[in-house]
Image (cartoon, grey):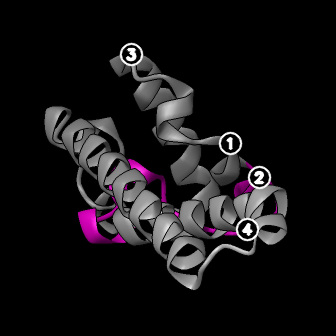
Amino acid sequence: MTNSEKLMVMRAHFAALGISPITGAPRIWRVLWFFGVPVPPLVFLRFATVFVVTGGFFAALWGLLMWLAFWVHRGESLWVVAGLPIVAGALFGFVNAKRARNIARTYSLPLWADYKGPQQL
């Protein structure tokens, strides 16, 4: 089964389970899929992977935005410029990873490599 076929099966499966399409496929994931990048949905990834990917992305984006909007003008220390985004990213990553794994556990969803659709669960 190709990645796009798997995604179609997953969408139908999630609709049948009542899982929101946003939960199964956040906006950034849908953009990546549109461009053909075969990234697995968050709920099919391991806790550590979700933690690092979402936390790292958030820390980098939020840190850059905060630096451009506020910190560059104030001359903040490196501890503030690097430390706050890392802490915020870690919290964001932890919450996302915990949520994704709770959904996967609730609906007995396997890892993406093992996912065959609802008939195999």
CA gap, disc 2 to disc 1?
A: 6 Å
- What residue sits 68% from the left and 42% below the top? 27
| Numbered range of the magenta stretch | 31-49
Q: Which mark is residue 31?
A: 2
Please provide percent x and percent y for residue 83. 46, 74
Labels 3, 1: front one: 1
- Nearer to the camera, 33 or 119: 33
The kind of secondary structure element at disc 3 is loop
Residue beneath label 4, please?
A: 64
Tags 3 and 4 in contact by the CB under 8 Å rule? no
Image quarter for residue 103?
top left
The kind of secondary structure element at disc 1 is helix
Query: What is the count of numbered marks?
Result: 4
First along the sequence among labels 3 and 4: 3
Residue beneath label 3, please?
A: 18
User: Is residue 99 one of those drawn in magenta?
Assistant: no
Please provide percent x and percent y for residue 21. 55, 28
CA gap, disc 4 to disc 2?
A: 21 Å
First along the sequence among labels 1 and 4: 1
Amino acid type of the residue tagged 2 in the rendering: Val
First along the sequence among labels 3 and 1: 3
User: Is residue 48 one of those drawn in magenta?
Assistant: yes
As displayed, is residue 83 above or below residue 55? below
Residue beneath label 1, please?
A: 27
Q: Which mark is residue 89?
A: none
- Nearer to the camera, 72 or 97: 72
- Tell me if residue 20 can be seen: yes
CA gap, disc 1 to disc 4?
A: 20 Å
- Nearer to the camera, 118 or 78: 78
